[in-house]
Amino acid sequence: MSMFTSTQIILAIMVVVYIVAKALKLSTELSMLLAAVAGALAGGAGIPARHIAEGAFTYFDIILIFITATLFMNLLKESGGVAFVIRGILKKFHRRRSILFILITILLLIPGALTGAGSVTVLITGGMISVVLSYMGLSKPKIAAIIFLIAGLSAAAPPVSLWAMLTAAGVNMPYVGFFLPLLIPCVVLALLTIFILGWKGQSVDLEKALKELPEAPKGMNWTRVLLPFLFFLALVILGRVLPHSFPILGLPLIFVFSAFVTVLISPVELQILKISRDTVKQLLPLIGTLTCVGILVQIMTLTGVRGLIAISIVTLPIVAVFASLFFVLPVSEAVLMWGAAPVLGVPLVLLFNTIGLNPIIALAGMSIIWPLGDALPPTAIIGRLTKDTVGMEEPYTQMLKHCIVPALIIMAVGTLMVIFSKSLSFLTLL
Amino acid sequence: MSLIGLVFLVFAGISFYKIRHLKEPVVLGPGVTQVKKLSTYFPKIKGSINDANIYFLEGSEPGGTILILGGSHPEEPAGRLLGWIFAENAIVEKGTVIVILSANRSGTTVTRLGGAYPPDYSIPTEWGEQTFRMGDRWSNPLDQWPDPEVYIHYPSGQELAYVDIRNLNRTWPGRANGTLTEKTCFALTQLIKDEGVDIVFDLHEAELQYPVISTIVAHEKGQDLAAMASMMISGTEDFSMGVENSPEALRGLSHREIGDHTDAISLLLEAPEPFLDATRGRTNRALLLEGKDEFVVKAGKHGLLFERIDENGWHIDVRVGRHCSTILQILELWSEDQPERGIRMTHVPRYAEVIANGTGHYLRDPSTASPGKLTFE
Amino acid sequence: MIVTLLYYVLTAFIALLIIWNLVKSKKWQDEILYIIILIPFLLRLLRLK
């Protein structure tokens, strides 16, 4: 039997096991785990404890960032800081929809841009902003769509864009020159998204909104809100400006230190242990997915399934590759999350490089399309998270319906960036 | 449930522990005159996992000095295996040959997350087989943790992917107060300066989908030498090697920084390793050592590769043999051009010999090593 | 060196939170998930991976 046939059989077995597991009402995470174990068995590897543990480790650093970033944000939320900011913005700008939209976009872009994770945006500012948007006359599914799409763009936005970083590392390309090629489309598309979806609404009913928004505790002020962020920024900037005299702290520890500052200056007493425990509980689906995706990718690599998928895609005619990016990238994201970068990103970028495209712009273009897949099953991780955070009661498909128009624009922009990457090369030099 | 988890933990844990502590024997060949530690050149690295063994093969006639770096990227095994062949066989008549088998020893103790690498691989020999740690491209996080959010190279200030702060071929020329990997490069740079090394060979392997392959990447100081060697190899050996100039914009790599920061000529050799290709099929020891893969062949048929591949694959003997012949060819040309800094050695096989006899033929049986003639990597 | 030590402390703290949630969890699917995500934390703490 050729390697193609045997690997196709293994892939088919994994898919069947996944579908059966889902049909038996198992969670997506456990279904992926079962599919991985089935793949290993079918590939003749038995139940490889070593590979399962190594795969579970794949996203360990990212998981640490998630937990510490979310803990920091949860502490800030509990201290009343986030409520204070949202109330402040609302009071000042409730008559000026455009400015409000721009500020909301910035607030949504920052957490994801800094951490590389759209989920952090959803968890940190998503909830509060959904309240503001609901008082601007927008339906919950529409709000969920806005937050989901901008959260995705925030994850792709610089400085930390994990798809670009992981793919660049995979092709031995330095993560340099990506700032503008990522920043410009992410900001423009985020603004387009909020204006397209949010324009038709009503003016803010300030009193009603303020009533529903959580009260900021007495003693909360701008200094107390901003100090932890300034501290965070200071540590990040120090690491950048004095990289060779300032110790390497890493994002998780920077978040932990910022969390300490939040606790120290909070006007209310914070129950650190309880908030920490709840944070882990809140993140279980996300961390679980990342861990199980890691295991799945490891087993797919072990059995050759990963190679089968990669070779099937990169050997399509180049026009077909361009034409299918809008579909293939989100689907790979839906199945593998960041695992899509090493599995698909690496061969695609090498392919683009071979045919003379600019790999940085092409990869930036791909990076803005990838996060759209976070709303799609099987994982749909950010989509589900957004639905829960916004408190949307309507069926999930309602949110997806509202995503369609901006998503099509994002796909088009990303694909065009790939096709015309050579002409856009100047962006990497600025 | 927790019990099953515990069983998993124990089994996986034992596997990780065993590989981190697997000893790889080196039988000191007749040419080895002394074995030093890397910390001789930079005491701050003493006692760390990267305090590598430095094998000296000194000839009776004065001449030049070369340094061969194996294991900059341990997941590219041809370079390490060549190191074994030299340390266990070569006899130097003129000049000094310095060999390092595990430039980044930390990187040999871990395998790629998500990469499904085998923990180890074995080379068949006439006396049984010898097992080596598989290793990864990066230092083990157990030895260097955490990574920054962006790695800023010293001294250029260039931004690189965060993981590459653990990549020995991105941290040249090194930093005395840096991370373990940076300190390792700093120590190696000191060695190059202190020993007056003329040429550094950094041995690598690459995926076939990577444009820099089957080539000598040369610092401008070594471009003529590399170009000449490339021509000679294509004419006399059964394979061809290209030449690439070391790009000035790409910082932290040996071919750039060693040449810039020391008097040595820096050359980096790349051999093809289908095991590293993103389109590879089943990831196992056979693929690592035989380099046969249908999926990579298909990628080649679609013009996606920078090196040819057919059903014969790229066997480890072919890759090791290429490195051997390339080094020997360069040294011959160098010695003709610079007789007073020349190198002359024997008992190192060329390409055709490695293929005919197998790499294992040149590995010595540690059980028969005389006392004092055995070290471990 | 101190930073690395702090990372082990952080890893231990999160591992304890996971174990705490595992013990309190009532859903069997969540329990399995907690056990799986705990594995890397324990392997790092034991300095095995």
Image: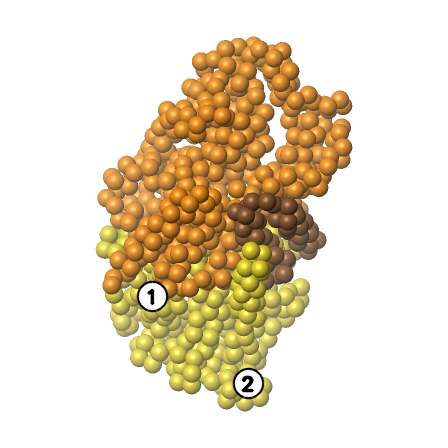
- Of the residues shown, which amino acid type is indicated by label 1? Gly
Letter of the chain in orange: A
> Do we see residue B260 in this rendering?
no
Q: Secondary structure at mark 2?
A: loop
Q: Residue at x 57, y 78 (%)?
A: B35
Q: Earlier in the sequence, mark 2 or mark 1?
A: 1
Q: Which mark is residue B373?
A: 2
- Of the residues shown, which amino acid type is indicated by label 2? Lys
Quarter of the image where the N terminus of chain A is located = bottom left
In the figure, is residue C5 to the left or right of A419?
right
Letter of the chain in brown: C
In the figure, is residue B26 to the left or right of A255?
left
Q: CA distance from mark 2 to mark 1?
A: 33 Å
Q: Is residue A90 above or below residue B181?
A: above
Q: Which residue is mark 1?
A: B291
Residue in the foreground of this view, choosing between B140 and B44: B140
Residue A277: give x, y in percent of width and height.
65, 42
Which quadrant of the figure has residue B185?
A: bottom right
Visual hue assigned to chain B: yellow
Q: Residue at x 50, y 11 (%)?
A: A202
